[in-house]
Image (spheres, coloured by chain):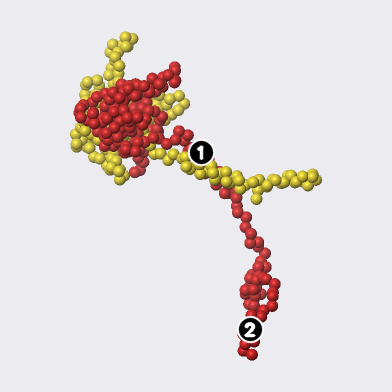
Chain colours: A red, B yellow
Amino acid sequence: MSGQKALSRFHQPIQVPGRRLIHHVPLPFVVKKAVGGGQRSVNQEIPLIPFIDFLLCIVLFLLASFSASGELPIDKNVRLPKAENVIDMTEAPMVAITGNQIIVDGTAAGSTRTIEDANRMQRVDELFGILKNKRELWKQVNPGKEFPGVAVLQVDRRVTALVVKSVFQTAAMAGYPSISFMVGRLGKGN
Amino acid sequence: MAGIDVGGHGGKRNLNHEIPLIPFIDFLLCLVAFLLVTAVWSQMARINADAKVPGPPRPDEPDEIKPEKELHVEMRGDKKFQLVWKEGATVVNTIDVDRKAVNMGTEGDITFPALAEKVTSEWKNNGNHKAPTDKKFDRAVLHTDNSTPFSDVIAVIDAVYAPQRDFTLGAKAQKLPAFNLTFAVN
């Protein structure tokens, strides 16, 4: 007998699948909720229109701040100082002055050691030649136009004033009288 | 999803159309990704200096041109700056300003707010070119030691450029530094 009773545990009729849980609770409103007889659909629509609006706003903002000219080439050996009373950058030949080298648009154009050893302001001949060639080239490409004469100096913060003044003077002699120093923007509230 | 319902079902072909929003969202996401990758978040700016020096006199120029007042900024001392107003070789006025550097940020940047304040008040009292339509700018000349680090030089130039004036060129009005700065040779 005891053996038959044990087997009857496994003898179950095949039933229609469906929800079983909480069916035997004698509270009708609980059974109704459990069975899923509610009125609201469980499916949800994802609100795509606000999402598209959001994406369009981002696209418009990024397009407004897009710069086709790309990033400004800053020499990795140059640590620029910062200043408050600044103006926006302009496109011009870049002269970088690192601790021991002068570079024009990536090309070496002299050494700062030579100036420091001489201990007096002097013209940097290599730089003068390169800048003069750039000026001539600009005039050939833009005939009849007035040469703007703007050059931008990227000077490391530790470079001495003697080197800066020598490069400044050299650029002026090569036909670039309007020199700009590239700096970081310092907020007024900093 | 979004669709266009033109109503009516009399025709043979259904005229209602679903707008394909998913490809459109994909396209927008690609655009956002591209623009984010190529965005330039540069904080670089520039400070102008001027190396224009008066050339030899032209024959059609009048013999006597009254020299304008120039502000010479001496930064050779350790304890003070000297502001010297000069008319040609004549010294008009000399003002001493304490050399008090204020540290900005953690990278060793400094400013000289006392110098900026004094230069601003001096320009208000003695500046020659203040009208917005005036194309000329007052001139400042910076005298510095050969061994001065560039960061100090920029801090002084920044202070000299503190006074700003209105400048109108055609229909475009803007605020620009009141002084045009150049370096003294010696």
- Taking the spot 25% from the left edge, 21% from the top edge, the residue there is B87
Q: Which numbered tag is attached to residue B172?
A: none
**Mark 2 belongs to chain:** A
Q: Name the outermost residue toward the bottom.
A: A1
Farthest-out residue, top = B59
Q: Earlier in the sequence, mark 1 or mark 2?
A: 2
In three-dimensional space, the C-alpha distance between marks 1 and 2, rounded to whole angstroms, equals 75 Å
Point 74% across, 44% down: residue: B15
- Say which amino acid is labelled 2: Leu
Residue A46, given in percent of the width and then of the height, sits at 60, 54
Q: Quadrant of the N terminus of chain A?
A: bottom right
Tell me which chain the residue with mark 1 is part of: A
> In percent of the image, x 30 and y 18: which residue is there?
B54
**Secondary structure found at label 1:** helix
Q: Are marks 1 and 2 on the same chain?
A: yes
Query: Which quadrant would residue A24 be assigned to in this image?
Result: bottom right
Q: Which residue is mark 2?
A: A7
In this rendering, position of residue A28 left or right of residue B84: right
Amino acid residing under circle 1: Leu
Label disc, if present, on residue A63 of the rendered structure: 1
Mark 1 or mark 2, which is nearer to you?
A: 2
Residue A47 in view, yes or no: yes
Q: In front: B91, or A162?
A: A162
* B115 sits to left or right of B38: left
Circles 1 and 2 in contact, beta carbons < 8 Å: no
Vertical comparison of B16 with B127: above or below: below
Q: Tag 2's secondary structure?
A: helix
**The C terminus of chain A is located in which quarter?**
top left
Q: Where residue B118 appears, x then y in whole percent?
A: 27, 34
What residue lies at 48% left-to-right and 43% top-to-bottom?
Answer: B36
